[in-house]
Amino acid sequence: MAAPARWIPLHLLFVSLLSACGGGSSGAPQNGDQGAADGGGSGGGAATEVSFFNQQIQPQLDFCRTCHIPGGVADADDGRRLMLSSDAANDLSALKAAWQALGGGVDSNLLLREASDPSEPHSGGKPWRSDSAIYQAMQTLLACWESPDQCHFSGGGEVSEPLALLGSSRATHVYETYCADKPDNTALPVDPRSTIQPGRNAGRAVHFNAWFEECQADLPAAEQNAKTCGEYRQRRDKGYAALVETLAAPSLMPLSAEDHDNRWQTWGLSSRPENFEALYSLRYGMNYANYHNPYPLPGEDPNSSNGGSGKLPMGLRQLKDENGRWTGEIGSVACFQCHGGQIDSNSGPLLTDESLGLGNANLDYLMVFADNSPLQYLGITSDIGNVSPEMLFNMGVKQRGQNNAVGAFELLAMLLDYDTLGLAPNPLKALASEGLDFDHPTAQAQDTPPWWNYSHRARKFFDAGQSVDATRILMAAGQISPEIFDGVTYRHIIESNDQDVSAYILSTVSPEYPGNIDTALAEQGAVLFHTKDLWAEPGNANAPRPEGGNGSCASCHGAYSPRYVNDPEFLEDPALEGLAAHISPLDTIGTDPARADNITPYLRATFGSTYFGSPEGDPDYVAPEDKNPLSEALDDSLPVGMRPEGACGWEQGVIGYQAPPLYGVWATAPYLHNGSVPTIDALLDSSQRPAIWQRALRSESGITGFDQHFERAYDSQAMGWKYQALSCEDIPGSTQLNCNPVDENAPSLLQLVESFLKQSVNWTALLSIPDPSPGAFDKRLVFDSRILGNSRDGHSFSDVLTDTERRAVIEYLKTL
């Protein structure tokens, strides 16, 4: 966890922020007491070269030793100009040998310049800034070496130890730490996210451009943010209870406990397997629930058996009636279907209650749809001729682990009234002055981010669409059932739960990495992550540079290391630790643009005036209950400029993708917003990314799904899921439909047709052209980057990292 802010004398702070050393080659001059002067060392005596070095410089060289050692990240052509050993007694001689090999001199010597001059490249940043105490001490030392007869060592006391390179808050929000031992009436501290306003952290190494917006100031008091520790704790606990108990919705097709318990009959099994619950998770990708989540087995009364002895996975919940009694009916919890990720280990599931909300890269929507086809309820197999209705209408989802949470916004905007959220299809909306666009992708699948980073970002969604203070949208899919479409019920569910759910999500923390960590290598990675300017490397000479920041990973993803969190060159306030509020434009990040194109200019402009944008504070706002049905229907067709402006709209300034905080990043594979990259190693080196790949599979009793076992299926070195690269011929189904006859790396003819339709006619993106070939349904287990929205491109500016540097950065990320 980041060290708490405290007063440090300015000259000692500069010394403590030393982060790496520049230049130098090895040598072995005698480490003697030369250059004595009358400057007075500690204890009042004359300072000698050795005493001066030991007091003013050597305490910081342990940090230089982080990288400048044999086998370290600086063990390269340039870095070898200064190499230190494990024995600190040799530091003075090694430093002098480096100075001599670089031609001597003082300010002109690369030993000093690379660590201080912004125009000189140095992966360790600029730790010896020209106004720092360490710079002045090095000047003195080099001047004495250059002109021994004019040497004068200034005395000084012992310097403080630098702050640690490693440490993480694990995304713990300030409310959790501050309120831990405070009474209920204690006022909450300032939420660091709310301080991310234009100008915040300007000119520093970490750059912000995704601004927080206050959404709730004009809402009723019950819908505003908590003001005290007691209110926060109460909302947090109610939010957890809502997610695991009350937000379950009846299934669109009635599902009893008996129906659920007999699901094995649709799997082609002859009897109910003893490990039914494990096989259910394997087939559908709904994972183990750490909380009490029961259903009654045959013959059990749920109300006399605490709900029953059966165990439902996250994403399902037994319903209760208005009197709080179990009903034996199984409902769905949409939140935990997408945010119910889990990783298994020899000792059981790795994620506990405090880390709930991992994006579920295991969810198999297509299999869920197939086994719940209406045809099943008629006693007819859903795989007639290998084509079933759910394979046609699939909300744009093509592969296991993906979902289309945001791609449906435009569909909802067309189907629901902007203000009431009631079902009100209105073609007149298309006549608004800006007009709805009909020639862009409307439903492209995406990977699901974890909840725990919610506490350290100013805006939510991959494109920074809305402020984190826009809590209403958290519940957009919170309870999908037919009765919500009267609008009144929908809004009531949102208003009754959004603040509570937001408070619980705010309280979640990232899981600790369960494997071994090479601490020495991780420390090198911490330096590179925070200080290496990727755009100073020749490989990025023609790459668009991000606006602001120092060009490091931290520039966009935030600062985490206590040493840099407390460095005013990085953050103007240590409370900003881990905050990521940076949107990279599409031409800078280079990733697939289909997700960004989902939200059209019209929708971006209109969204703030909808119920989700909290427009109540606008003087022109009229509540739905104060309008007649005709005017309520017609006002949705008004040009954007004539609609009331909400407190929190959709991001319209920078169109691109928001760099996420990286707490618990080890658990969030695959990577990029579309999940197209299986490991961090491949993310940092785009040449390693496979075009078509498949995660490790596990089969049991004829059921196949993704293997989520950490010891068996996780690649600790590459950080991500083990995978097998495939060719188009390896994809299940028809080779003729899977491969392009001209270019095997190009999209297939079937994919080209689908892509054309999905980019030309909006709602075709909700459909798929099925492959009727035997076994083609198993395409869902293969990631194919040739599909529209699935491109593996982007984030290629990190390709300039060397193999050693990349390994160090990966090791550091494990510590977050």
Image (cartoon, helix red, strand yellow):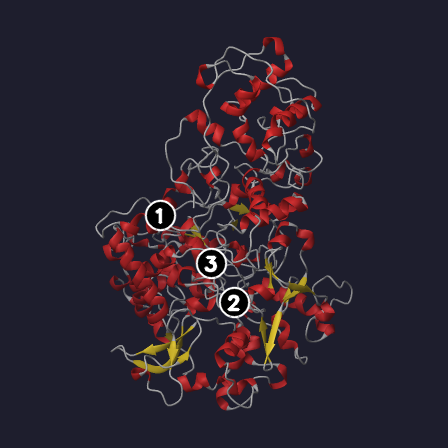
Give how far across and how far down residue 414 sits, in percent: 44, 65
Q: In the image, which disc is placed on residue 450?
A: 3
Q: CA distance from mark 1 to mark 3?
A: 19 Å
Q: Nearer the viewer, residue 154 or 335?
A: 154
Relative to 346, say whether 682 is above or below.
above
Left or right, 715 with reference to 11: right
**Which SS class for mark 2?**
loop
Label whose residue precedes the other's in the sequence (2 or 1): 1
Residue 322: x and y in percent read 26, 77
Residue 344: mark in rendering: 2
In front: label 1 or label 3: 1
- Write the residue at 58% across / 34% down: 64
Rendering coords of residue 581 (x, y %): 46, 45
Going from the N terminus, do you reach mark 1 or mark 3 first?
Answer: 1
The residue beneath circle 1 is: 174
Residue 814 lies left or right of residue 506; in this view the side is right
Dot 3 or dot 2: first in sequence order is 2
Q: Residue at x 61, y 49 (%)?
A: 795
**Distance between the Cα atoms at labels 3 and 2?**
17 Å
Q: Amino acid at mark 3?
A: Pro
Say few, some or many: other residues with alpha carbon within 10 Å of mark 3 (under 14 / 14 to 19 / 20 or more).
Answer: many
Residue at 46 percent of width and 25 percent of height: 158
Q: CA distance from mark 2 to mark 1?
A: 30 Å
Crowdedness near tag 1: few (<14), some (14–19) or many (≥20) residues, C-alpha within 10 Å: some
Quarter of the view holding residue 82: top right
* Image height of 409 relative to 652, above or below: below
Which picture quadrant has residue 415?
Answer: bottom left
Q: Is residue 558 above or below residue 340?
A: above
- Residue furthest to the top: 149
> What residue type is disc 1 on?
Val
